[in-house]
Amino acid sequence: MPRDFDAIVIGTGQSGPALARRMAGEGWRVAVLERDKPGGTCVNTGCIPTKTLVASAKVAAMARRAAEYGVELGGPVRVDMRRVKERMRAVSGKSRQAVARSLEQSENITFVRGHGRFLGPDSVAVGGDVLRAKKIFVNVGARAARPDMPGAGQVPSLDNSSFLELDELPAHLVVVGGSYIGLEFGQMYRRFGSEVTILQRGPRLVPREDEDVSQALRALLEKEGISVRVDAECTSVSLRGSDIVARVSCDAGAPEVVGTHLLFATGRVPNTDDLGLEEAGVKTDARGMIVVDEELRTSVPGIWALGDCNGRGGFTHTSYNDYEIVEANLFDGGGRKLSDRIQAYALYTDPPLGRCGMTERDARESGREVLVGKYSMEDVGRAYERGETEGFMKVLVDASTKQILGAALLGIEGDEVMHTLLDLMYARAPYTVVTRAMHVHPTVSEYLPSLFYSLEPLAP
């Protein structure tokens, strides 16, 4: 016999549990379904474990530079990968347990472990049970994509998830894909002690960024001893004894790269293929993403899609913002929509890249009269004092309104400093708010006025 609820939440990523708790707090009876580990990508295979590894890699890199700061360590730096991974699992596990505990102990929430599949627009099967509700929220996330190339299914390979289970240190890691995941893993494992080669099929790394950002990222990675190959498309992979051979289509460089471990960092696909969405009539696009409107509603009344599975963000913070939009429209008078948010994210190389708003290409295509300012991190006091002067800060401004259009902050604390500009963008305030403010010394943010003083017309 079906079990009736006021709402069903499928998946426990960043938006699902928060929404479930709010609905339960309003007195709704809520069923929350999870087929795997509570917490979704961020907690289990994304932000929390990987940034914990980034932290360990940073310590290793700084330890090797200790003598520059007058600190003697008394011997070569050695990384114990088993202990590195133990720390990562402890940090990730604590967050996962907190998510599970909040769902298990919340009044009005029934937490169900199992795979949910739609039977119709108001019913979901899980295990041997059928659950029904007039409101269903899908928060099932995404997973790493496996490239369609010869040998990919036969050669041992890793993705961002399976890599976390590897306790050994690769002698030579070959990374296929030169965007965010590939660069983060490439740098951290170089710092742990691996030889690393990154293969990028296009002419530059992180192609969605401006060219100067791509060039600076390549330079800092190569400075650390990473082999970066662009215009180098991996066309097949095979085994040669115990080694992995990546065949490369390229105009320059060797046509083969031989390594001990292979990481595919070639994009992600939504976990929507086994939800029975067709039984409910929910539309998806060509990539399998659930089609949603401005308020995260799907093509079927009473069904919403939040997080990575809707193709409208792909980040932890966009997923959480999806929750905030749905929550406001259900309980707080409405008025919130996807188009209100400004694109913002960070790349967690060291130094990090903080990004918000438009790129130079976007600004040119907008038809506006645009000003651009750029300031080298070499001239930032805090960066110089810490001996971490890689990168630059760049900002784009509308010449007529003086409002900030976008920014790229590649340098120490760039991911944090970016929020000052992002908040001004949401406030639609002119950049002069920054130039007229008094900032604390010595910080990175105190150089934002200098960044704006460098404004000049953006080249066509």
Image (cartoon, rainbow, N blue to C red):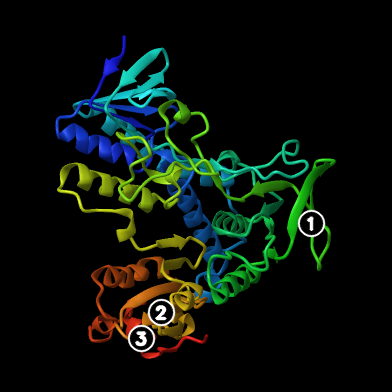
In this rendering, the label closer to the viewer, 2 or 1: 2
- Can residue 275 be seen here? The reply is no
Judging depth in this view, the residue of 100 and 9 nearest the camera is 9
Residue 405 in picture, x, y percent from top left = 37, 75
Residue 206 in picture, x, y percent from top left = 57, 64
How far is the residue under mark 1 from the one under mark 3?
45 Å
How far is the residue under mark 2 from the one under mark 3?
9 Å
**Amino acid bearing label 2:** Leu
Residue 331 in picture, x, y percent from top left = 16, 42
How far is the residue under mark 2 from the one under mark 1?
37 Å
Judging depth in this view, the residue of 367 and 216 nearest the camera is 367
Dot 3, crowdedness within 10 Å: few (<14), some or many (≥20)? Answer: some
Residue 104 in picture, x, y percent from top left = 28, 27
Regarding mark 1 in the picture, which secondary structure is present there? strand
Q: Which residue is mark 2?
A: 396
Residue 351 to residue 10: above or below: below
Q: Residue at x 61, y 54 (%)?
A: 189
Q: Residue at x 54, y 59 (%)?
A: 60
Regarding mark 3 in the picture, which secondary structure is present there? loop
Dot 2, crowdedness within 10 Å: few (<14), some or many (≥20)? Answer: many
In this rendering, the label closer to the viewer, 2 or 3: 3
Residue 432 to residue 274: above or below: below
Q: Which residue is mark 1?
A: 248
196 relative to 161 in the view: left or right: right
Q: Which residue is mark 3?
A: 399
**Amino acid bearing label 3:** Ala
